[in-house]
Image: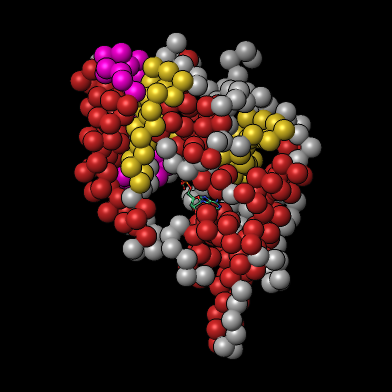
Amino acid sequence: MSLILAVESSCDEMSVAILRDKRDLLCNVVASQIDTHRLFGGVVPEIASRMHVECVSTVLKTALKEANVDMKDIDAIAVTKGPGLVGSLHVGMQAAKTLALAYHKPLIGVHHIAGHIYANELVEDIQYPCLCLVVSGGHSELVYMKSEFSFEVIGQTLDDAIGEAYDKVGRVLHLPYPGGPIIDKMALEGEHTYPLPLPLNDQTYNFSFSGLKSAVINLAHNASQRGEELVPQNLACSFQEAALDVLVSKTIKAAKDYNVKEIVVAGGVSANKGLRSLLTQKSPIKVLFPPMSYCTDNAAMIASAARVMYEHHQFSSLDLSVKPNYNLEEESIGDESE
Ligand code: KG4
Ligand code: ZN
């Protein structure tokens, strides 16, 4: 039995969630700053951390009220310790440490990507060994998990993350930030008519999306120089097909090579409808996607990962500090049955 209060503030969302045991999510309050960052075409780190400072107390109070729980009943305070924007992470970390100190509660520092992966357990148990496809604004990784909370990164992006590539292509198409969800919608309305290169279509498990992104930018630039009109829906469709082709084929290859029981998708881009249908259709094994409401950053996913860490007694001391860049493998608890 556990009652965990989690704080997530790694980028432009301040979120507090309270989770009882594995699935009883009492609240998941998310204060998004997207409307502000949209004015600048992307996240401005300084603004993000300032806005977090302004709203953290309100988000916390709202969460406690919504969940109808008292701080004294909470078993542990969880917080995203990284990776992410240093200033943004600090705000959540200070709030979590203050609560832990004031109410004498254990502290659990959670890796943001472990959170994205364990968002899936808010609805269904993960079957191990599994292969995780992590696709977000900052990450594109293939992670092999032999057992609960054991992470082996077997492939990663050599340059841009997939979400970053979506957002940059969105800019070329003059779409508001973040472009990812809009491109996804446009791609469904368009046809694949523009020839684009398949990104790093080799035998490794690594990804590379900067070449594909540059090909889209060049295509748009050349068309404008020739005074030609592009069909944005078709360009969105051609870009999405090229990106998903490699993501899906490498994921399935790795799943077969590692002989896993299921594929688990995690991160903001797991909301992509094209990815959901292509991977489900092509995969010979079960694919788990997080519910749409837990795909992009939220504290419920941090609470879910922290619930596993709580059961394994993975607590942090109060001198815990943020880690803007750090490896998921460092978080592995490993197979205790060995
Ligand atoms: O996980 P997340 O909220 O933040 C990071 O940890 O990075 O992911 C945000 C990213 C953005 O790049 C956004 O454009 C992308 O996820 N995204 C999508 C979709 N929904 C969100 N990309 C493609 N299709 C979507 N439906
Ligand atoms: Zn994220």
70 relative to 165 in the view: left or right: left
232 relative to 32 in the view: left or right: right
Q: Depth check: 330 or 196 in front?
A: 196
Q: Position of residue 114 (x, y in %)?
A: 50, 33
Image quadrant where residue 150 sits? top right
Residue at x 56% of width, y 60% of height? 183
Q: Depth check: 192 or 259 in front?
A: 192
257 relative to 270 in the view: left or right: right
Q: Position of residue 237 (x, y in %)?
A: 65, 63
122 relative to 274 in the view: left or right: left
Q: Quadrant of the N terminus?
A: top left
Which residues fall within the magenta stretch? 67-88
Residue at x 34% of width, y 32% of height? 16
Q: Position of residue 207 (x, y in %)?
A: 63, 53
Q: Depth check: 66 or 264 in front?
A: 66
Residue at x 51% of width, y 70% of height? 173
Image quadrant where residue 264 sits? top right
Q: Is residue 71 magenta?
A: yes
Q: Quadrant of the C terminus?
A: top right
Q: Is residue 61 magenta?
A: no
Q: Position of residue 268 (x, y in %)?
A: 51, 45
Residue at x 60% of width, y 25% of height? 124
**Against 204, is 335 above or below?**
above
